[in-house]
Image (cartoon, rainbow, N blue to C red):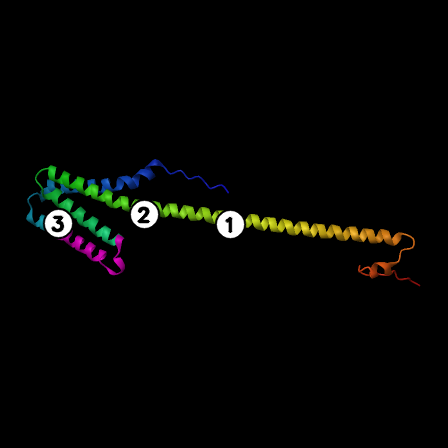
Amino acid sequence: MNEPLIQRHWVALAAPKAAPAVATATVLILGRIWNANGAEHSIGNAALMVVLAAGAATAGAFAAAGRGGGDGVLAGTAFATSGGLALAGVAGYADGLPLPLLLWAVATAAAYGLAARYWRTDRRDTVAYERQSKVRREEHGHVERVEALRAGAQIEVARSGAAYAEQLATALITRAALPGFNPQTLTDAGLPELPTPTEHH
């Protein structure tokens, strides 16, 4: 059975790989825009970002320490939010560009580290699913071949049985037409008794 070939566009393939860098760069750019609009040296803005980042990190810690090993997706989202808020706060509050760029590089590397773990898991799941699908297809194909062989054998048995019955009937009819034929001899030999022709008066 031929599988349909699906070729994904290179943009669809590259988008997940570029997402962490795009996300951290967006936060950096927004932080610098915020800096240019008066966030620099604003204690209130810095305190707000510290509180928000700490709150997100605390939520991530609670999610990670929850029952049954915690919710990994929720914890990862909370920690990513905390890191994004911290990066935005530094980018908005800092005087120059070197510190925000340094934090952007660290955040991007951390984002790729986390994403690579999920990409590996996703790849393992995809490979396992493809392997199971292939095994199921092979099993179904084997069952179909066996059933086709069995049906063919039954058809051949039925054909050979019908041919034997036809040959037997022809032989009996031919034998009955010969002079001196005695149907009782066939019955004594174990063959089914032939119906005797009835005479109509």
Residue beneath disc 2 = 121
Q: Residue furthest front?
A: 189
Residue, x 22% and y 58% (percent of image)?
Answer: 65
Choose top left, top right, bottom left or bottom right for residue 93.
top left
User: Closer to the camera, 90 or 145?
Assistant: 145
What amino acid does circle 3 point to?
Met
Q: Is residue 134 visible in the rendered structure shown here?
A: yes
Tag in front: 1 or 3: 1
Q: 61 left or right of 139?
A: left
Q: Real-space Cα distance between discs 2 and 1? A: 28 Å
Q: Is residue 129 magenta?
A: no
Residue, x 37% and y 46% (percent of image)?
Answer: 126
Q: 118 left or right of 168?
A: left
Closer to the chain start, of discs 2 and 3, is 3
Q: Real-space Cα distance between discs 1 and 3? A: 59 Å
What amino acid does circle 2 point to?
Thr
Query: Label 3's element?
Result: helix
Q: Is residue 58 magenta?
A: yes
> Callout 2: few (<14), some (14-19), or many (20+) C-alpha neighbours within 10 Å?
few
> Callout 1: few (<14), some (14-19), or many (20+) C-alpha neighbours within 10 Å?
few
Query: Label 1's element?
Result: helix
Closer to the chain start, of discs 1 and 3, is 3
Choose top left, top right, bottom left or bottom right for residue 181.
bottom right
User: Closer to the camera, 144 or 18?
Assistant: 144
Query: Label 2's element?
Result: helix
Q: Residue furthest top?
A: 10
Residue beneath disc 3 = 49
* Stretch of the chain drawn in magenta: 51-72
Residue 140 marker: 1
Closer to the chain start, of discs 2 and 1, is 2
- Residue 95 x/y as whole percent: 7, 39
